[in-house]
Structures are given as C-alpha cells and as structure tokens.
Amino acid sequence: MKLLRKAKVNGLRRLQSTTGEELRRRRMLLPSVLDRAFKGEL
C-alpha cells in the first residue's frame, strides 16, 4: 500500500515538473508572439 502511494506521489511530482517546464517555455514565447501580432505579422 505504501509503495503504491509512493509511486503515485513520484508520478505526480514528475508530471508537475514537466508541466512547469512547459509553462516556462510558453511564457518565454509570449513576448515574441505579441510583438509579431502588433506588427501585423501574424
């Protein structure tokens, strides 16, 4: 039982880490996308 709970917690931690990395990447792209949009390039 404890092993199953520990495996679930570890899986959630990995998912959270991956999700955080993806959000950081998207946040880095936002200024570029907005700049292009205001220049009429999109």
Image: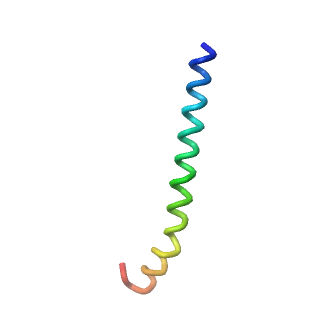
Residue depicted at 59% across the width and 31% down the height: 10
Residue 16 image-quadrant placement: top right
Quarter of the picture containing the N terminus is top right
Is 9 drawn above or below residue 41 in the view shown? above
Residue pictured at 43% horizontal, 80% vertical: 36
Colouring mode (rainbow / by chain / secondary structure / one colour): rainbow
Question: Quadrant of the image for the C terminus?
Answer: bottom left
Residue 9 appears in which quarter of the rendering?
top right
Percent across and percent down for residue 21 are: 55, 53
Please give the name of the residue rendered at 54% of the width and 32% of the height, measured from the top-left corner. Answer: 11
Count of residue discs: 0
Q: At x 59% / y 37%, what residue is drawn? A: 13
Q: Residue 34 in the image: x percent, y percent?
A: 48, 76
Residue 33 image position (x, y, % from top left): 45, 74
Q: Nearer the viewer, residue 7 or 41?
A: 7
> Which residue lies most toward the top here?
1
The location of residue 41, given as percent across then percent down, is 37, 83
Spot the residue most to the bottom. Answer: 39
Q: Is residue 39 above or below residue 10?
A: below
Q: Is residue 5 above or below residue 29?
A: above
